[in-house]
Image (tube, rainbow, N blue to C red):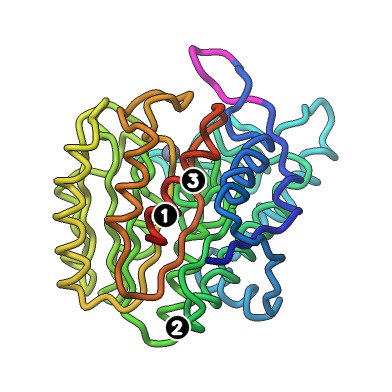
Amino acid sequence: MIAYYHPDSARHKPLHRIAGGELRPTFETVARIELLQQGLQELNIPLAMPDVDAARLGHLISAQHDAGYLGFLEQGFATWQAMPGTGPELRTSVHTSRHMTRLPEDFLGRAGYYQADSSSVLVEGTWEAARASAMAALAAAEAALAGRGPAYALCRPPGHHAYSDQAGGFCYLNNAALAANAAAAQGARVAVLDVDVHHGNGTQQIFYSRPDVLTVSLHGDPAWLYPYHAGYADETGTGAGAGANLNLPLPLHSGFAAYAEAMQLALARIRAHGTEVLVIALGLDAYAGDPFACMGLRIEDFARLGAACRLPLPTIVVQEGGYPSPDLGRLLAAFLGGLAG
Ligand SMILES: [Zn+2]
């Protein structure tokens, strides 16, 4: 197995998230990188710099994300900084909603249009880090598609909550979708299997009307968990993509038995899709000891989950959530060890 990571991923240093009605330290910190790297070291997986063609990366990003949104990600923080009385994080307080969806002229209004929630702040270096994360995903996709075995992308910031035109849930560019699109561009039938504890709402939106990319997400029931407003079992795709989205919400604090059952359904659908390339959106936050503490998986369960994902297909593993705990690296090692067999 080979792994990719670009050091610019560490340039994004958000400070806060809103919890309990106040600003509290964010969980999506640079410390995650070192913990995840320890997991790779445990398995002696070499870490390579993503060496991808900048034009190809730019083309894939532009094909997947809205031009105005990309401009906001790239220039938004500089605009914010140039305004008087602004702090170190670009966070707005008015977002689009089901009753108001217009794109205004004012910068703060535009921020509320492009940020789905308050957890996707822009800071100095956000764009560079998001792009570095996308580079790792593309490099892993190219390695797996070239038949070099399963490939892992240490993507940070994560990506699965990023829509085509909105940041959300610590995510800016959708890395798993980018890997899937890179494979689909070669004519492959692709499945994205998202095992993060939170629903992969951005990935679902990006592929919702596409028949060639199946999206499957196992996650805590959104009736009780972020992202709350999507991720239900009756969301199955639309138009040409009808039937190509499968949500498997699980009761909070479920253990491996519930995951094993859901995985059987997920794998049956992945086989029925005629999948030729598998993208795993790997969140490690279903761990009972994760700071979010909303699911009941143990370390050894991640090895079983990894083993269940071992299919005779080019496989790209893209890092999503999973937050600092002393065990974060061990969780990654368990999953990748199980996947490698
Ligand atoms: Zn998550």
User: Residue 245 appears at what percent x and percent y?
Assistant: 23, 60
Q: Which residues are magenta?
A: 16-22
Quote the CA–CA distance across marks 3 and 2: 29 Å
Label whose residue precedes the other's in the sequence (1 or 3): 1
User: Residue 78 appears at what percent x and percent y?
Assistant: 80, 46
Residue at label 1?
A: 281
Under circle 3, the secondary element is helix
Closer to us: mark 1 or mark 2?
1
Magenta: main secondary structure: strand
Residue at label 2?
A: 185
Tally of marks: 3
Whether residue 68 is visible to the viewer of this picture, yes or no, is no
Residue at label 3?
A: 332
- Residue placed most toward the observer, 171 or 281: 281
Q: Ligand 1 quadrant? A: top left
Vertical order, 255 against 279 (above or below): above
Q: Disc 1 marks which amino acid?
A: Ala
